[in-house]
Structures are given as C-alpha cells and as structure tokens.
Amino acid sequence: MNIQKNLAESTAFIRSRSQLKPRIGVVLGSGLGAFVKEMDVETSLGFDEIPGFIAPTVEGHGGRLILGHVGSVPVACLQGRIHYYEGHSMAAVVHPIRTIAMLGTEIVMLTNSAGGLDPNQKPGDFMIIEDHINLMGDNPLKGPNISQLGPRFPDMSEAYDRKLNAHMEEIMKRRNVRYSRGIYAGVSGPTYETPAEVRYLQMIGGRAVGMSTVPETIAANHLGLRVCAVSCITNPAAGIVSGKLSHDDVTGTAKQVEDTFCGFLKEFVTSI
C-alpha cells in the first residue's frame, strides 16, 4: 500500500467536491452516527466513492465522510469506521483520519462503543478516555516512517489532550451526563473477551474495552493533532454480569443515549 499516493488521491478527490477546511474531525463509532443530524451538511461522500477509502461492513457504521458546519465551526465527520478485525491493514484503518488531517483538521474527537470493565458503570454511561493500552498486536506506524507525516518515534505521554478532556468533563457535568474517566484497552477482536481476559484487563488498569480508536489515536498523534476520545459504555464486559453479549446490545444502547450524546458533542464542538 502506497500510503502517500493514496492520501494524495483521497485528498484531491475530496477537494474536487468541497473546498471546506475542517477545524475539527469527528469519528462516530458503533450506533453513534446520528450526530450528523446536528450538522449543516455541505458535502456527503460514501467511503466507497473516495479513492483509497474502504466501506465498513459492520452494522452501525454508515461509512460516509460528511463535510459541513456545526454552528459556525467547520467539521469533517467520519460516520463510521473500518476495523482491524475486518481483515484490513493498520494503514487502511487509519487512512480516513490521515486524510481529514490533510484537509486541515487540527483537533480530532474519537468516539466508540465499548464494554465496561468497572462494575459501577451502567449501559449508557460515558467514559472520557484518559489513556489507552494497545493490545491489538499491531501498530499503524510499523514499517518505514513517513517523515512528511511525523517523527519516527512520536511521543505518546499525552495521547489524549488533557485540556480537551477537562473541557469534555465540564460539559458532561453541566448537562448531568453520567460519566467516568479511565483507560481504554484496545483489542483486535472480533470476538468479545472471555471472563478471564476481562479480569486481566481490570488488573492492568483498563476501565473500558473495545476494538477501535487506538490505531486512530496513534496516527493522529504522529500527525501532531490534538486528540480526545469518549466511549459509550454499551454493556458490561463478560463475567461482570451473567448473560451473553451481542452486537445488538451495543447498537441498541447507543441508540437509547443518542440525544444525550448528540447534545454533548454539539456543545463540545461549538465551544472549543
């Protein structure tokens, strides 16, 4: 995969459809795509239309790049994402986030649906991601470094911007949103974790577990973007409560908190 060539082709195609320079990029995770209703949409492109992009195959991921405004703020919104477990390379997984950086994005807000590792978390709660543990067994920066994108060894000591996190927390408090702060454990999937794996994740400090976000965070930090992320806790992880897990639970819970999520995200985007 020629990363630079693909980025140039994707960017040129999008620029042929829109001259909007987004300040903020938003990635909408499983079941969280309704935020686009808050946008004044200028251009909407399917991933399958854009050279170098790959359409998602997972329910709850619309697979569209939407350019427009939220209030007066220019935004690039990735409605859905592709995942490593779908069989794609890490370079393909982070290609959309790199592309919106090429369009001018300075700040990236990543969202996901995740399993809760804290028994006090309830489905529908949110978690501000303070840090992550990469357990995916791969890294999007593996291979020759592309110096035009960033340094060989990017610093990850503040992978999630503390000021942006504090701002998210202020908004959640003001809006009476149930939330916590914690570490996100990124795993490859596509199976849900076993109870033994959940106990391990708890032991190493994880508070939520999911199959996305970590590659995008790494790629965005490599590019020098400010990153923040929030998880919608859609279900307790395996073994915390009895019962089996399903993707329907994930998308169903995300749907239930749609209005809360959209209200929070709109205020966040328009106030930074």
Image: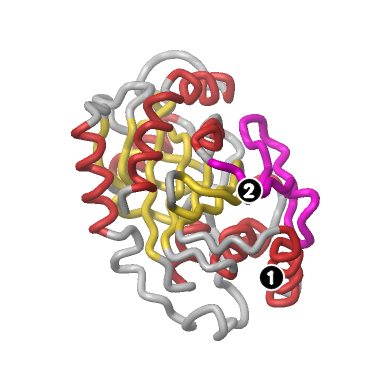
Residue 35 on the magenta span: no
Quarter containing the C terminus: bottom left
Please give left or right for residue 179 compared with residue 112 in the image.
Answer: left
Residue designated by label 1: 7
What is the three-letter code of the residue carrying label 1? Leu
Start and end of the magenta stretch? 40-65
Instruction: Please state the horizontal and vertical placement of residue 173, each as a whole percent of the image.
Output: 19, 34
| Residue 249's disc number | none
What residue is at 67 percent from the left and 49 percent from the top?
A: 43
Please give left or right for residue 54 compared with residue 110 in the image.
Answer: right
Front-lying residue, 205 or 131: 131
Q: Is residue 48 above or below residue 240?
A: below
Quarter containing the N terminus: bottom right
Q: Are marks 2 and 1 in contact (CB under 8 Å)?
A: no
Residue 62 on the magenta span: yes
Front-lying residue, 242 or 236: 236
Instruction: Please state the horizontal and vertical placement of residue 243, each as a whole percent of the image.
Output: 46, 14
SS for callout 1: helix
Please give left or right for residue 231 compared with residue 12 in the image.
Answer: left
Inter-mark Cα distance, 2 to 1: 22 Å
Q: How many marks?
A: 2
What is the quadrant of residue 2 in the picture?
bottom right
What is the three-letter code of the residue carrying label 2? Glu
What residue is at 24 percent from the left and 58 percent from the top?
A: 162
Mark before the other along the chain sequence, 2 or 1: 1
What residue is at 24 percent from the left and 49 percent from the top?
A: 167
Q: Is residue 166 above or below residue 3?
A: above
Question: What's the image's color scheme?
Answer: secondary structure
Please give left or right for residue 32 compared with residue 116 in the image.
Answer: right
Dot 1 crowding, Cα within 10 Å, few <14, some 14–19, many 20+:
many
Residue designated by label 2: 42
Front-lying residue, 138 or 53: 53
